[in-house]
């Protein structure tokens, strides 16, 4: 939902209630001596709810303070960090502000059960905050073909990316927070990794979209891939969703040989056409 921020001559600009989205993706840990996984936590908060303070003539700045924590099954914290996210300076706060603020953290965690907790607050307005928790279970599987979690993207995976928290398998990934594909987002992109595939083995892929309350596929798209020797097999795809009716959907990724189903993975997404999709994420300030 888009909001108009109305500026009084000397007052800070205040908008909607705070909101936080936590997207979590699990990948196989490349260090085989540790029974665990690489976990990527992608925290996103919209810019609409922040208070914009005047810093200079025609210059207004906001800031969100994000606290990320991961707790083990015993309640002890295994990770904690505070991050300040700042959107670009604005000269005109009467315009609709769409861009979210995002931060990603990559952790290596042993097998087990965890709780991820995120808290975001407005740095310039007391009481404007929200807390969100998500469970996380990590289990290492050896030997059999398996897929990582499916990462839903707002843009195509870009090849040749430099190593960073936002790249995997040689691709730069721009996530679609919460798996939301709004007005103007006519294509869905995804990234996942296939583990334990036989080198040079030709494999069949199927991407199936089905409403969460439906019994038949709304869309099915086939593809192929080939196992990569010595490392995970990256799988990327582009799916046209412009004719997909609004609603909540399950996206199932299947990996098959000519005779059998090897492994599957599921992600959830939401399609709506009332509001336009966000234009992108601002760079966080540390």
Image (cartoon, helix red, strand yellow):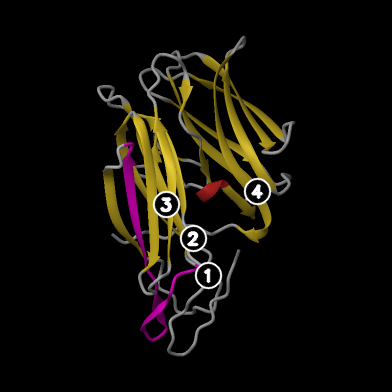
Residue depicted at 28% across the width and 59% down the height: 286
> Which mark, residue 271?
4
Crowd class of label 2 (few under 14; some 14 to 19; many from 20; radius 10 Å): some
Q: In which quarter of the image is residue 127?
A: bottom left
In percent of width and height, residue 130 lies at 44, 60
* Image coords of residue 70 (percent x, y): 33, 44
Q: Is mark 3 on a helix, strand or loop?
A: strand
Distance between the alpha carbons at the discs numbered 2 and 1 = 9 Å
Mark 3 and mark 2: span between their CA atoms?
11 Å
Q: Distance between the residues labelled 1 and 4?
A: 22 Å
For residue 19, which numbered disc appears in the image? 2
Q: Per the image, is 212 magenta?
A: no
Q: Nearer the viewer, mark 1 or mark 4?
A: 1
Q: Position of residue 228 (x, y in %)?
A: 43, 20
Circle 4 packing at 10 Å, graded few (<14), some (14-19), many (20+), is many
Magenta segment, prevailing SS (helix, strand or loop) = strand
- Dot placed on the residue nearer the N-terminal end, 3 or 1: 1
Give the mark toward the camera: 3 or 2.
2
Task: Determine which of the numbered discs, if any, sits on residue 16 in the image.
Answer: 1
* Local secondary structure at mark 4: strand
| In the displayed structure image, the side of residue 109 where residue 3 appears, left or right | right
Q: Which of marks 4 and 2 is in front?
A: 2
Over which residues does the magenta segment extend?
48-73
Give the mark nearest the N terminus, 3 or 2.
2
State the mark number for residue 43: 3
Q: Please, what secondary structure does the residue beneath circle 2 have?
A: loop
As displayed, is residue 223 above or below residue 184? above
């Amino acid at each position: 939902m888009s909001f108009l921020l109305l500026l009084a001559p000397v007052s800070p600009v205040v908008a909607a209630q705070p909101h936080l989205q936590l997207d979590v993706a699990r990948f196989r840990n490349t260090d085989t001596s540790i029974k665990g996984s690489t976990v990527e936590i992608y925290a996103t908060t919209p810019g609409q709810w922040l208070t914009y303070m005047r810093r200079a003539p025609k210059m207004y700045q906001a800031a969100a303070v994000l606290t990320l924590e991961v707790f083990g099954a015993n309640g002890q914290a295994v990770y904690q960090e505070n991050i300040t996210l700042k959107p670009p300076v604005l000269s005109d706060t009467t315009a609709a502000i769409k861009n979210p603020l995002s931060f990603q953290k990559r952790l290596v965690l042993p097998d087990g059960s965890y709780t991820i907790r995120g808290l975001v607050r407005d740095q310039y307005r007391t009481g404007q905050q929200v807390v969100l928790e998500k469970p996380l279970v990590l289990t290492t599987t050896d030997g059999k073909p398996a897929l990582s979690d499916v990462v839903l993207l707002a843009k195509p995976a870009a090849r040749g990316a430099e190593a960073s928290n936002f790249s995997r398998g040689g691709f730069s990934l721009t996530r679609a927070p919460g798996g939301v594909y709004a007005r103007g987002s006519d294509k869905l992109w995804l990234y996942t990794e296939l583990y334990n595939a036989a080198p040079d083995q030709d494999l069949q892929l199927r991407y199936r979209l089905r409403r969460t309350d439906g019994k038949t596929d709304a869309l099915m798209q086939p593809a192929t891939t080939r196992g990569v020797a010595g490392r995970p097999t990256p799988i990327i795809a582009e799916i046209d969703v412009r004719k997909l009716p609004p609603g909540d959907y399950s996206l199932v990724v299947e990996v098959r040989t000519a005779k059998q189903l090897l492994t599957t993975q599921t992600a959830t997404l939401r399609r709506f056409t009332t509001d336009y999709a966000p234009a992108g994420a601002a760079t966080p300030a540390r």
